[in-house]
Image (tube, helix red, strand yellow):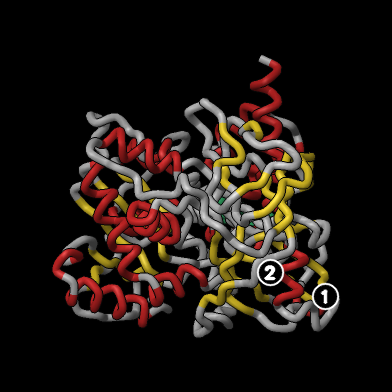
Amino acid sequence: MASLNIAGVLKPAAKGHGGAHVAHHKNTSAMPVERMPVPASVTIPLSQHIGAPNEAQVKVGDEVKVGQVIGSTDAFVSAPVHATISGTVKAIKPVRIVNGNMVNAVVIESDGEMALSEDVKPPVIETKQDFLNAVRASGLVGLGGAGFPTHVKLAFKEDAGVDTLIINAAECEPYITVDHREMLEHPQDILSGIKEVVKWLGFKNAYIGIEDNKADAFQMLLKTMEENEEFKDVAQLICLPSTYPQGAEKVLIYSATGRQVPPGKLPSDVGCVVMNVQSVSFLGRYLKTGKPLVSRSLTVDGSAVAEPKNLRAPLGTMYSDILEYCGGFKEEPYKIMAGGPMMGIATIDAEVPLLKNNNAITCLAKGSVKVKPTRACIRCGRCVEACPMCLEPTLIEKKAHLKDVDGLNKASVMTCMECGSCAFACPSGRPLVQYMRLGKAIIREAGAKK
Ligand code: SF4
Ligand code: SF4
C-alpha cells in the first residue's frame, strides 16, 4: 500500500493486481514548465482526436489569429481545432503524424505577433448543455490518453448512476513530469476546473489520485484548498502506490473506489468518469478566459536529449523544433517516442507535429534501450502475475498464433490496455504486447467480415 502518510489524504480503496516496478527516471520533476519561443511555422493536423475528422475552415492565403477555429465538423464525436499561432495559412496538405497515419493539416507561417482572435471570450454558461457545448468548443480531448473528446465523455445520461469524478494525476509513466508540475504550478486551475465539472454534472464524489512519489503535489493541493474558501472540500486526495500502470483508467478506478469495470464496459457503467489532471486544469483556465486548446505542456527527456525540459509549446510545433530548443541530441537517438517508454509510440523521425494528446517526447540512446533476445516461453507465469487486468498473456499469444477468434474472445484480449507490464516481466523477451495487438486485430477483422 501507499507509503506516504499525510493528514487529510485517503488511502486507496483497493489494491490492484500485478503491475511493474519500473525505474521512474523523473529527472525533470524540479524543472518548471518553460514557454517555448514561437516557432517560425506550425503544422496543425485537422483531426487530433478519436472520432469524425474535421474539415478545414480556412484556405491557403488566409490570415489567422490565435484561437480561431481552423477545422470543425457537425459530428458529435469530434473536437474542433484552432490556430495556435497568428500568421498566414501557407498550405493545407496531408502530413504524417506520430502513429504513421497521414492526416490533413493546416500549415501556418508565424507573423511573430501571437495576436488573439476576437472570438476568444469566456463562455456564458447557464445550463448543463451550455457547459457541454463550451467544453466541445474548447477543442478539449483527453490530454493524457488516446485523444477522446472530453464533451463526449461528460455527456452521460442523468439516470446512468454516474456519481464519481476521478482526476488522474498518477503520472506513472517513466520520465514524464508535466502532471506533477501542473499540480505545483497551477493548483488553483485544477481545483477550479474540478469545481465546475462537479457543479454542472452533479458528481457526488471527486477524487484526485496521485502516486506517493509526489509528496510536494499533495502538500500544494491541500494548502490551496485550505487557504481558499472557494476550493474547500472540492476534492479528496488519494495516495496511490507508485506501481506502473497506476494511471491506467480501470486500474485507477479500482484503486480509488474498489469498483471493477467489467470487460467490454466503460467507466460510466460503474458510475465513474476519469479525467486527466491537465485536462481539468485546462478547463479551469478556459472557463475563465475562453482561450481554447492551442498549446500544451510536455516533458522532453531521455538519454539522447542534450537539455531535458518541461515545456509549453503551441500545438502543431514540429518535434524537430522542440528538440532543437532542447539543445538537440547529445547521443544519436535509437528511439524517438511520443509519450513515455512504456506506452509511447515510436516515430520514424522527428518530422512530426505536436498533437493535443502528446504529453512527452522521449528520446533514448542505444545504450539505454534493453532489447531482450526472444526465447521460448518457459511457462513461468510472470506475465500472468504482472497483468493488472488479470489476463493470461501467454495464452493470448498462442490464440493469436492460431488466429483462434473464439479463443481470443474467451481470453478477453479486448480488455488488454497494452500497458506492457507482461512484456516487461517476461524473462524470455516474448513480444507479448505485439501479440495482444495482433489478437485484437484478428477479432476486429473477423467482426468486419461478419
Ligand atoms: S496483457 Fe495487456 S493489460 Fe495485461 S499486462 Fe500485458 S499489455 Fe498490460
Ligand atoms: S512471462 Fe514469458 S516466459 Fe513466462 S509464461 Fe509469460 S510468456 Fe512465458
Q: Is residue 204 visible?
A: yes
Image vertical order of residue 376 relative to residue 160, above or below: below
Asked whether 434 or 280 is in front, the reply is 280
Say which amino acid is labelled 1: Lys
| Screen quadrant of the N terminus | bottom left
The percent coordinates of residue 320 (x first, y second) are 77, 66
The percent coordinates of residue 264 (x first, y second) are 47, 34
Q: Is residue 187 shown left or right of residue 402?
A: left
Image vertical order of residue 275 relative to residue 268, above or below: below
User: Distance between the Cα atoms at labels 2 and 1?
Assistant: 13 Å
The secondary element bearing badge 1 is classed as helix
Please identify the residue farthest to the top as the structure is shown: 450
Circle on res. 366: 1
Q: Is residue 102 visible?
A: no
Residue name at image x 61 percent, y 60 percent:
314
Say which amino acid is labelled 2: Thr
Residue name at image x 23 percent, y 29 percent:
159
Counting labels gives 2
Q: Is residue 66 shown left or right of residue 303?
A: left
Q: Which residue is mark 2?
A: 362
Tell me the crowding category of disc 1: few under 14, some 14 to 19, or many 20 or more residues within 10 angstroms, Cα based. Answer: some
The secondary element bearing badge 2 is classed as strand
The percent coordinates of residue 32 (x first, y second) are 50, 80
Residue name at image x 60 percent, y 54 percent:
84
Please identify the residue farthest to the right as the structure is shown: 332
Asked where in the image residue 7 lies, by quadrant, the reply is bottom left
